[in-house]
Amino acid sequence: MDATKYGEREHITAQTVNSSSSKKALIVGDAVVSESVFQGKTSQKLSLPVELDGRRKVLRMNTTTVKNVIDILGAETISWHGRWLSLNVVNINGKESVIGMVLR
């Protein structure tokens, strides 16, 4: 049995994107709201089920990524199924962040 997947995180991080061969994620389901804690502050984020390099992952969407996707695909998340996102890592306020853009 290949135990690789048991040593990986479920959520996409900057490290996940940096080590990805494709840096492209396929949206495979509807978004759900999840809570996230950063520096002691709790916030709600959209979590999007995706497939990255053949592995199921969850993309916690930051505000920039949500706006990018809505601008191209609209606000209804069910219509995002089957679409591809290009994932990039950028430094925002000293923190590496994953930014997604819809591939056309």
Image (tube, rainbow, N blue to C red):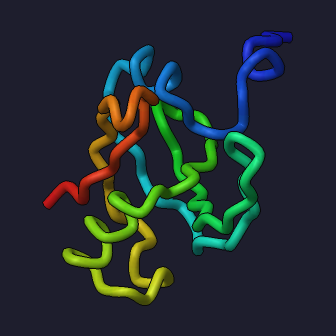
- Estimate the x, y position of residue 33 in percent, counting from the top left: 68, 72
2 in relation to 28, above or below: above
Q: Pick the quarter of the image with the N terminus.
A: top right
Q: Residue at x 48, y 37 (%)?
A: 52
Return the x and y of residue 17 as percentages of the image width and height: 43, 27
Task: Check the image and report above or below for 70 versus 8.
Answer: below
Query: Taking 22 as reference, is 4 above or below it?
Result: above
Q: Is residue 13 above or below residue 70?
A: above
Percent of width and height locating residue 102: 24, 59
Q: Quadrant of residue 23?
A: top left
**Is 6 displayed left or right of 17 in the figure?**
right
Please name the residue shown 32% across and 55% down the image. 84
Residue 18 appears left or right of 101? right
Left/right of residue 84 with respect to residue 53 in the rendered view: left
**Would residue 76 be found to the left or right of residue 22 on screen?**
right
Q: Residue at x 35, y 37 (%)?
A: 92
Front in this rendered view, residue 98 or 16: 98
Residue at the image position 57 percent from the left and 61 percent from the top: 48
Residue 64 on image: x %, y %: 33, 59
Quadrant in which residue 69 is drawn: bottom left
